[in-house]
Amino acid sequence: MRITVDASPAAKEPRTGTEFYTLHLILALARIDSLNEYALLLNEEVPEEFAHLPPNFTIRRIPQRRLWAQTRLAQELRTQKADVFFAPANVIPFMHPPVCVTTVHDVAFHFFPECYSPLVRWYLELTTRFALRTARKIIAVSQATKEDLVRVYGAEPSQIEVIHSGLPGTETVLPTPDRVASTLDHYGITPPYLLFLGRLETKKNVARIVQAFFKLKERGFPHQLVLGGTPGVGFEEVARLINTSPYGIDIVLTGYVGQEKADLYAGAEAFVFPSLYEGFGFPVLEAATYGVPVVTSRTSSLAEVAGKAALLVDPLDVDDIAEAIHRLIEEGQLRSRLIQLGRDRLPEFDWDIAASSVVEVLEAAAGQPMG
């Protein structure tokens, strides 16, 4: 079977959820599938991770930044004699091959329209509806995303296959204490500290994290709060809270975090991630990888991903968030139990297993036998 893949998200920097998904899924497909032929199409420089793909993978770079999927990609697909086109990031060109499969990661733009510009929101709404109407099969990264597609867009449940993502691209060896100490010194972080990683925006619920942290400081807790990420929509409220509180001096804003992410996880006492909406929730798995107990939301996909390995809270309830953090700090047995449950849960999220399931979906869509 010949499979053409829109690999462009894997080439984008910096990488967030969709980009990580595309990169690691392609690498896993290369590990587990030597029978099918893959043509990877992208518009940026070829990622260095693709340097040693097997012979059944070819790469074609077609440079263009804007509207690439609807122009250059669409043109190239007309020349490709593929059995199926796979779009890992939800966008199927309006001029497309007969057999298409795509992955839908979330519909956050529907629930939090204020976090997107009108143009981006319009485009995401358009491409999502088009994908649901066009694709023979839809892959959802969580059951929560599948349920959103059915409830919001009236999608046919049998059209959608839930395939959980694998672990994020984390280091397999924990960073050394010296390396962690060096990173903390670089950012001006003094343990103990609580950690949040992600865009500093309304959708991530950062303002309520800050408010919960202030409640802990009022109780005399010595911790810092480290907010790792770039400002997004709604950051003004976060900045106002920090600047008007006497406890604002205990909040560290790191900006975008790259390779130092592992060090920040490894040194944290707890990871606080009560996001209002996530299609999957990679950071919950990242924290578990580094043995950090997690506070997260019982909404969207987060409870699905965390299972029993995190304290689940109402993300709209500041007191609930603060109390959960308080428990993680004070209750040693609870911390140890959640850390172990997190480690035990990690094998359930395996990229090779995900890739095998994706191949089955692609073969089914193309009308070819599986196995």
Image (cartoon, helix red, strand yellow):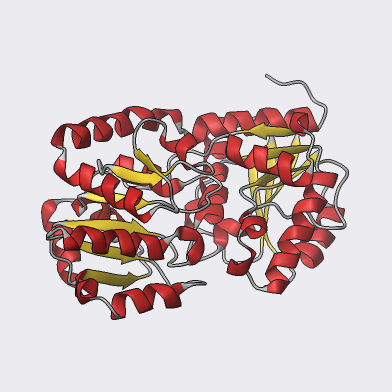
Left or right position of 89 against 219? right
Is residue 238 visible in the rendered image? The answer is yes
Expressed as whole percent of the image width and height from the top left, the position of residue 13 reads 50, 66
Is residue 259 visible in the rendered image? The answer is no
Image quadrant assignment for residue 67: bottom right
Q: In the image, what residue occupies the spot 32% across and 64% down?
A: 210
What is the quadrant of the N terminus in the image?
Answer: top right
What is the quadrant of the C terminus in the image?
Answer: top right
Image quadrant assignment for residue 179: bottom left
* 39 to 342, vertically: above or below: below
Q: How many labels, in total?
A: 0
Q: In the image, what residue occupies the spot 30% across and 75% down?
A: 242
Image quadrant assignment for residue 246: bottom left
Viewer-closest of 230 and 364: 230
Left or right position of 118 against 11? right
Viewer-closest of 208 and 65: 208
Left or right position of 263 against 222? right
Expressed as whole percent of the image width and height from the top left, the position of residue 360 reads 68, 27
Viewer-closest of 20 and 217: 217
Expressed as whole percent of the image width and height from the top left, the position of residue 129 reads 79, 52
Q: In the image, what residue occupies the spot 24% across and 60% down?
A: 215
Expressed as whole percent of the image width and height from the top left, the position of residue 101 reads 75, 41
Q: In the image, what residue occupies the spot 87% across and 57% down?
A: 95
